[in-house]
Image (spheres, rainbow, N blue to C red):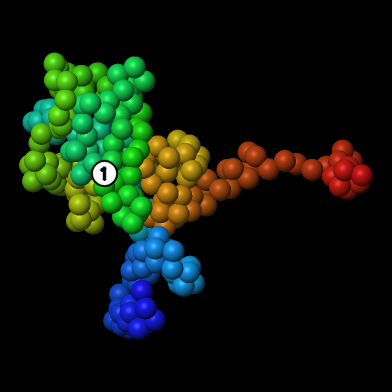
Amino acid sequence: MGNSTFSKAVSVGNKLKDRGIDTNAYKRALKDFLTSKGIVIGKKIAVGTSKSKGKLSKLFVERPIIDEMLEWIKSIDFEAYLCDDFMLKTGTRLTASLKALIENINFEQHTIRVYDKGRHSLYPEGKEWEKYIPLKLWQNLMKLIRNRKSGKIFNISIVELSNLNREALKRFVPELEPKIEMPNHFWRHMFFQHMLRVTDWNYAVCAEWGGSTVASLQESYSRPPEAVVREWGLKYMPTLEASEIMPIQILGV
């Protein structure tokens, strides 16, 4: 990329910014592309913080309601229910879920290899992720697969699944439904929202199991609630009594 081309790319970013458009994703993609090509100047691009940071922090639904949604969907279409449950339990995106292959299942380890979204310059066909399949989900998948040895696990259409999930959202979380642009992606969000809570907001563990990055999760779901941070402090911060631990001991002298 020559200097003139780079200048044009920067100019586009500035024009987007002037129009009030969040340029975080644009700058990140440009930096990623240049860096992947070994162009040093790419490292100097300041990506900054997205205006949408923490935008999904309030998109949370309690587990009992989620279970009711899944049961309702199950009563209508077992495969749709199973696909939703797969996204919920593994954090896999819709496209990767629908492309998941039977031959990529490890029947001994109860895991599956999927190719989900990653940096396009590094993973043009999707990044490989190993996903653990919980027991109940595993048993239901075996019912769906039956005697098949290869091919896609799910054969439901995106439109059919979207319509059913949209209706479920309207029925069970009407106050949130208008805010959810992609009804199928809702299940991946619920994976991270609940995993973050059960792991005490361990972003690294959730990113590894859900197929994401720590930076992406922090950007989407923000920091832990203040009450959680305070609870950590009371639970984990040691109480240092001067009579028990002297400064000279702390310094190791």
Q: Nearer the viewer, residue 33 or 192?
A: 33
Q: Quadrant of residue 19?
A: bottom left
Q: Position of residue 28 (x, y in %)?
A: 38, 65
Task: Please rate how many residues cluster around mark 1, counting C-alpha atoms within 10 Å: few if below 14, some from 14 to 19, many from 20.
Answer: many
The residue located at (19%, 48%) in the rendering is 183
Q: Nearer the viewer, residue 175 or 34?
A: 34
Q: Amino acid at mark 1?
A: Arg
Decide which of 31, 199 is in the foreground and name it: 31
28 to 16, vertically: above or below: above
Residue 168 is left or right of residue 9, and the answer is left
Whether 247 is drawn above or below 29: the answer is above
Q: Position of residue 235 (x, y in %)?
A: 63, 38
Q: Residue 54: give x, y in percent of width and height.
A: 40, 58
41 relative to 104 in the view: left or right: right
Dot 1 lies on which element? loop
Q: Residue at x 58, y 43 (%)?
A: 231
Q: Is residue 162 above or below residue 219?
A: above
Q: Which residue lies under the disc numbered 1?
A: 93
Which quarter of the rendered picture does the C terminus lie within? Answer: top right
- What is the total number of numbered labels drawn onto the structure image? 1
**Which of the 4 quarters of the picture holds residue 52?**
bottom left
Name the foreground residue: 116 vs 21: 116
Residue at image x 8%, y 46%? 159
What percent of the width, then of the height, locates residue 112?
30, 29
Would residue 135 be visible to someone looking at this image? no
The answer to whether residue 160 is left or right of residue 68 is: left
Quadrant of image for the N terminus: bottom left
Q: Residue at x 36, y 28 (%)?
A: 132
- Quick check: can you spot residue 231? yes
